[in-house]
Amino acid sequence: MSTIYNRPEELFMAQLSPLLKQATPVVVDHGEGAYLYDVDGRRHLDFTAGIGVTSTGHCHPKVVAAAREQIGKLVHGQYTTVMHQPLLKLVERLGDVLPAGLDSLFFANSGSEAVEAALRLSRQATGRPNVIVFQGGFHGRTVATATMTTSGTRFSAGISPLMGGVHVAPFPYAYHYGWDEQTATKFCLRELDYLFATVSAPSETAAFVVEPVLGEGGYVPANTEFLRGLRERADEHGILLVIDEIQTGFGRTGRFWGHDHFDVRPDVVTIAKGLASGFPLSGIAASQELMAKAYPGSQGGTYGGNAVSCAAALATLDVIEEEGLVANAAARGQQLLEGARLIGDKTPQIGDVRGLGLLVGSEFTTADGKPDNATAQAAQQEAARRGLLMLTCGAYMNVVRMIPPLVVSAEQIDDALAIWSETVAAVTK
């Protein structure tokens, strides 16, 4: 009998929600670098990186040491009550890598919270009600951020009414449209102008919120012409350009920020995932001038800027710099993309292979060009059985994505490509 609730233990067993669907059958014992080891001792190449989170690999010694040391000093110092050294040091350290002019930071825990903070700042600073997001974007799972998410209906179905004031413009996903990139880009900018004329007047639009590479939407990079077009319209109409760097930041794309590839200046960036190598930490960065336009008391939270997470983030930034991980992501990303394209070229069921840095997606389609979810899912599962862990994404979940940690080696990329080649051959024969 339970001594607390006075009931037979055999009648009560807590379980995880059945809505949590596991992408792989692996039960992990420990991780090291690019590998996960399961409870049976089998080694798996982890090309999920916790959905782009474990940027320095699993349990990097420097990150582990920083977290251990901090746990012995202070675990939680609520940062609107007291201030602590890891947070102050992190603010200073981020000043070395943030886009020019973005010198004011607010910290939270999750990507969704960061996007909501950017949304709140944009509306309060401009006094305008509307935001424009882009087709295929993923920004979170809260009601507000699910409203802003169009990478799949699974994130917003069944929770209506959703938040008002969110309008959707097309993203230059050239393969989806069946066009070249330039044609897709011109179409998207023309449709954005049409949206201004028909749905959300510029004077009513607070912000554009855009990912430099669609994440959950299928690993589709933006391009310079498109993002420059957003910047020009933002400047013309007093609209803020919010770039969601939650999955693309901290070296993931082979530049420190995803938008660095496209020569564009953001007004706000949202950050999370790779910032703290697996410890929960997110935030937004903007200029002091812009941040000061939000309402007093509109930013806060119990766990934001956690001391252990901040210590881990400081160590993460050190490792990224000391080990040249941004350059490694560029080189290994090129190797991965070229290898995946060679496999795709030999596989009629793979319609497109694309990516940027260590974000590479292979899109499966049928002979008549329709999304092939079944083969993509079969490939992802077969690869897991062979020791390569990956995820799927895209509106139809027909894109298999590779997201290795930034510490991945050339040999590990070769090993993954060999497994992927064997996997694709097995599921498409």
Image: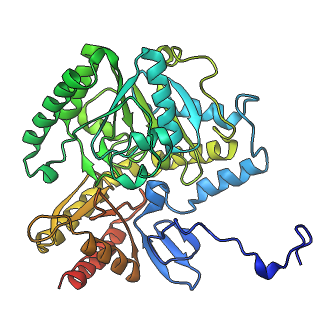
- Residue 2 visible (yes or no): yes
Residue 188 lies left or right of residue 28; in this view the side is left
Q: Residue furthest right?
A: 3
Residue 91 lies left or right of residue 125; in this view the side is right
At a point 27% along the width and 65% down the height, the residue shown is 398
Quarter location, residue 73:
top right
Quarter location, residue 83:
top right
Q: Position of residue 40 (x, y in %)?
A: 57, 86
Number of dots carrying numbers = 0
For the rendered model, the colour scheme is rainbow
As drawn, 152 above or below 416: above
Residue 126 lies left or right of residue 114; in this view the side is left
At a point 18% along the width and 72% down the height, the residue shown is 343
At a point 16% along the width and 26% down the height, the residue shown is 194
As drawn, 41 above or below 207: below
Residue 345 lies left or right of residue 10; in this view the side is left
Q: Quadrant of the N terminus?
A: bottom right
In the foreground, 172 or 251: 172
In the foreground, 18 or 267: 18
- Residue 271 visible (yes or no): no
Q: Position of residue 307 (x, y in %)?
A: 69, 42
Q: Position of residue 395 (x, y in %)?
A: 29, 56
Q: Quadrant of the C terminus?
A: bottom left
Q: Position of residue 151 (x, y in %)?
A: 33, 50
In the foreground, 349 or 96: 349
